[in-house]
Amino acid sequence: EADIYQTPRYLVIGTGKKITLECSQTMGHDKMYWYQQDPGMELHLIHYSYGVNSTEKGDLSSESTVSRIRTEHFPLTLESARPSHTSQYLCASSEGGFGGLSTDTQYFGPGTRLTVL
Amino acid sequence: SQQGEEDPQALSIQEGENATMNCSYKTSINNLQWYRQNSGRGLVHLILIRSNEREKHSGRLRVTLDTSKKSSSLLITASRAADTASYFCATGGYSGAGSYQLTFGKGTKLSVIP
C-alpha cells in the first residue's frame, strides 16, 4: 500500500454545498495529481502540482480548485457542488524528477466517491 | 496525444487461463507502465518498461514493448479470481509544451471466473 491518504472515502451532500476533499502523502513526493473517474470509465486529469505553490489545470475542465501550501497536502475544493460533480476523485503522487530517467510512477490513494443530490 | 488505447475493452476468462491485454499509443515515449485497479479503489503500479527494453517479467506478469508498432502487451499467466480488476496502460513522455507527463489509457476490464 502506498502512503497516500484520502478523506472522506464516501461523501453524499446536497446541491450548493461547499466541499473539500483531502489528500495527503508521506512520501515527500514533489508531484501530486487529482483525477476524476466515473465508475468503470477512464481517468481524467483535472489538476496537478509540481511542488509547493505550483498548481495547474489538467486535460479535463473542472469547476474545482486546488491548493499546495505544503508538500504533503493537496486538497481539492468545490465551492458549490452540483449533481454533475458526482464521480470518484482519485489523488496520486510521484517523485517527479526530470530528464531521460524520469518515470513518473504514480502512487494512488483509495479515492473519494462523491454523490451530489 | 500520446494516450494509450487498451484492447480489448473487456475480457472474461476461466481461472488458470492466460490473459493478454494490448495497448497502442500514438507518439514517442520514454516508458510505458501498467496499473491495476480493483473496483472502487485507486490504481496500483504493476510494472514499467522503458523505451529501450523489449520485454520484462515480474512474477506472473510479462510485458512486451514494440516501439516500431507503438504497442505493448500485458500477459498474466495462470490467472486467478483475485486478478479480476481493470488494467490500465500509461505512457510516459514529453508533451508539446516540453513537460514530462504520464497519460493513462481507458483500461481493460478483466474478469476471471473461478
Image (tube, rainbow, N blue to C red):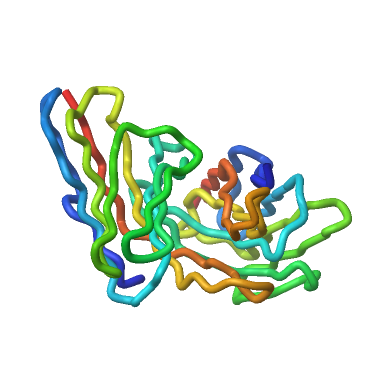
Q: Is residue B89 above or below residue B54?
A: above
Nearest the eye: B97 or A5: B97
Nearest the eye: B108 or A64: A64
x, y percentage for residue A28? Answer: 34, 76
Q: Is residue B91 left or right of residue A33?
A: right
Find the residue positioned furthest to the right: B68
Q: Is residue A4 left or right of residue B22?
A: left
Position of the N terminus of chain B, as image quadrant, is top right
Residue that appears at 17% across and 45% down:
A20
x, y percentage for residue A92? Answer: 39, 59
Find the residue positioned furthest to the front: A53
Nearest the eye: A52 or A5: A52
Residue that appears at 37% across and 50% down:
A34
Q: In this view, does B84 lie to the left or right of B105?
A: left
x, y percentage for residue B72? Answer: 74, 56
Residue that appears at 29% across and 48% down:
A66
x, y percentage for residue B42? Answer: 38, 55
Q: In this view, does A36 lie above or below B53?
A: above
Q: In which quarter of the image is residue A68?
A: bottom left
